[in-house]
Image (cartoon, rainbow, N blue to C red):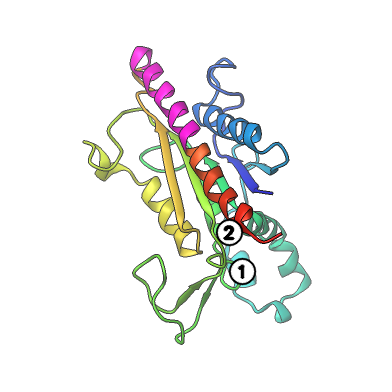
Amino acid sequence: MTRLLHLDASPRPGRAGTHNHGSHTRRLTHHFISRWRTLEPDAEIVYRDIGANPPQLTSVEWIEAAFTPIEQQTEPMRELLTESDALANEVIRADILVLGVPMYNFGPPAAFKAWIDNIVRLGRTVDYDPKYGPHPHLPLENYLPLLADRSRHAVLLSSRGDHGFDPGGRLAALNHMEPGARTALQFIGIAGFHSIAIEHQEEGGDVLAASTASALSRIDRLVENLHLELETPRLTQPA
C-alpha cells in the first residue's frame, strides 16, 4: 500500500475550474490524488492544509528546543515541538509527497517555508557528524539524510502568474520555488523530485486554459509512471 501526503499551501479555498476564484494548485493536487485513487483505491492519504492552517514559525524558543537532545528536553520544549514532530512524522511515513504550492513573488508562500523549516530537523530527518562522508544527493559533507533509507518522491504542483520559469525559460533565473524545495527535500533524503506548473495565470484566457490542460495531462502520465515504479518491487517480492 502506498502512503501519500497531500499538502495544500494556497490560502485560496476551493479549486479552480470548480469553485469561483478557486486555487489552481488545489486543482492540481486534487487531480493527482483522484488519479492515484483510481489505480490504488486503498492507498493511504494523509491531508494537510497549511494554506488554511499555517505551521508555527521558528522562534528562539523553538530553536533551543529543537537543538536540545531529547533526553534533556523539558516538558515545555516537548510541547513546543509537538506540531513539528507531527509534520515530520507525516513526511517520514509517506512514499510520495504531493505538494500544491503557488508561486508568490518568485518563491513559495510563507506557510510552505514554515513547513520546510518544521520538517528539516536535526536528529529527525537529517543528522550531522564529521564521520559522515559525502551527501548522496547534494555537494555537502558530514550530513546524513535520514529519509534516504527507502525510495521516496516529492511532486511539486505549482501555479505562476507569468510564464517561462522552467529550466531554459526566459525567467528561469527568477524561479526560487522548485530549486529551493528540491534542495531542502533532497537534503533530508527524498531523492525523487518532480514538478509540474500552470503558467499564464495573470494573462488568463486561452493560454491559461492550454497550460492547465497540459499540466493535468502531465500529472496523468506522472501518476502512471510513479505507480508503476512503486508497484513493480511489490510484485517481484517473494510470496
Asked whether residue 213 is drawn in magenta, I would say yes
Image point (52%, 30%), residue name: 28
Dot 2: element: helix
Q: Name the residue under label 2.
A: 119
Q: Image quarter for residue 149?
A: bottom right
Q: Magenta span covers which residues?
A: 204-221
Q: Which quarter of the rendering shows the C terminus? A: bottom right
Q: Name the residue under label 1.
A: 124
Q: Position of residue 164 (x, y in %)?
A: 27, 33
Dot 1: element: loop
Is 44 displayed left or right of 136 in the figure? right
In this rendering, the answer to whether 235 lies above or below 121 is above
Q: Main secondary structure of the magenta part?
A: helix
Q: Residues within 10 Å of mark 2 (few under 14, many from 20)?
A: many
In this rendering, the answer to whether 181 lies above or below 129 is above
Which of disc 2 and disc 1 is earlier in sequence? 2
The front one of 32 and 229 is 229
Q: Where is residue 60 in the image (x, y as percent from the top left)?
A: 58, 66
Query: Quick check: can you spot residue 109?
Result: no
Q: Image quarter for residue 93?
A: bottom right
**Residue type at tag 2:** Ile
